[in-house]
């Protein structure tokens, strides 16, 4: 019994996708940051939502059911959180520097999915870059790549 409690505390309340595959804590944290970026302008756009789904599926090689499970778990975490630091710390600890830059590009794609960058979104991106130890130059390069990326299809 003590071992089960210890294991729960070590891995948190990791969700399981319908496929039985455990959703990693860093996947949930990445999805939570993407959801935060989507909601910051107080207008959830269908294109932003579709972009998040496509990015998560591509980044973590998830099927539709696993993506929905990941988004549901991230949603629960976002609802129960009042700050970004916890999500960013999990990403910083689990992702390499290059992977953190890739995540910044994913975030830029979400904030630009509706065709415009709001002041609150720009502020969020600066804060997340700082928390992930991604330089302004690296974030700017990720932003340029996101702007040049082909639009999401399907």
Image (tube, grey):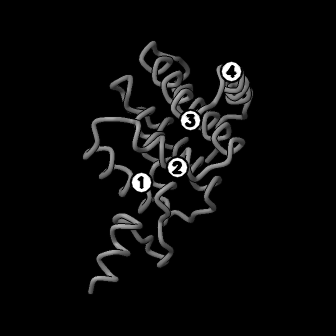
Q: CA distance from mark 4 to mark 3?
A: 14 Å
Q: Earlier in the sequence, mark 4 or mark 3?
A: 3
What's the distance in space between the residues labelled 1 and 2, CA to CA? 8 Å
Query: Answer yes or no: do the residues labelled 4 and 2 have beta carbons within 8 Å?
Result: no
Q: Look at the picture and state if 139 lies above or below 91.
A: above
Q: Nearer the viewer, mark 3 or mark 1?
A: 3
Task: From the image, tell me which residue sits under label 1.
Answer: 71
Name the residue tied to disc 2.
53
Question: Residues under labels 1 and 4: Cα distance?
Answer: 27 Å
Mark found first going from the N terminus, 1 or 2: 2
Residues marked 4 and 3 touching at CB (< 8 Å): no
Looking at the image, is mark 4 or mark 3 nearer the viewer? 3
The residue beneath circle 4 is 140
| Rendered image quadrant of residue 60 | bottom right
Q: Residue furthest toward the bottom?
A: 1
Q: Secondary structure at mark 4?
A: helix
What secondary structure is found at the residue carrying circle 3?
loop
Residue at 34 percent across and 65 percent down: it is 13
Which dot marks residue 125?
Answer: none
* Mark closest to the chain's N terminus, 4 or 2: 2
Give the secondary structure at mark 1: helix
Q: Earlier in the sequence, mark 1 or mark 4?
A: 1
Label drawn at residue 132: 3
- Residue 129 lies in quadrant: top right
**Crowd band around label 3 with a 10 angstrom C-alpha radius: few (<14), some (14–19), many (20+):** many
Left or right for 8, reference 32: left
């Amino acid at each position: 019994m003590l071992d089960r409690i210890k294991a729960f505390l070590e891995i948190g309340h990791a969700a399981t996708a319908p496929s039985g595959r455990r959703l990693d804590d860093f996947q949930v944290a990445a999805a939570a940051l993407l959801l935060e970026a989507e909601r910051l302008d107080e207008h959830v756009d269908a294109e932003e939502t579709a972009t998040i789904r496509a990015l998560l599926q591509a980044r973590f090689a998830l099927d539709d059911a696993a993506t929905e499970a990941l988004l549901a778990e991230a949603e629960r975490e976002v609802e129960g959180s009042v700050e970004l630091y916890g999500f960013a710390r999990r990403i910083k600890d689990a992702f390499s520097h290059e992977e953190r830059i890739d995540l910044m590009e994913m975030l830029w794609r979400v904030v630009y999915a509706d065709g415009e960058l709001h002041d609150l979104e720009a502020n969020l991106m600066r804060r997340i870059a700082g928390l992930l130890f991604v330089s302004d130059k690296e974030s700017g390069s990720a932003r340029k790549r996101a702007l040049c990326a082909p639009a999401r299809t399907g």
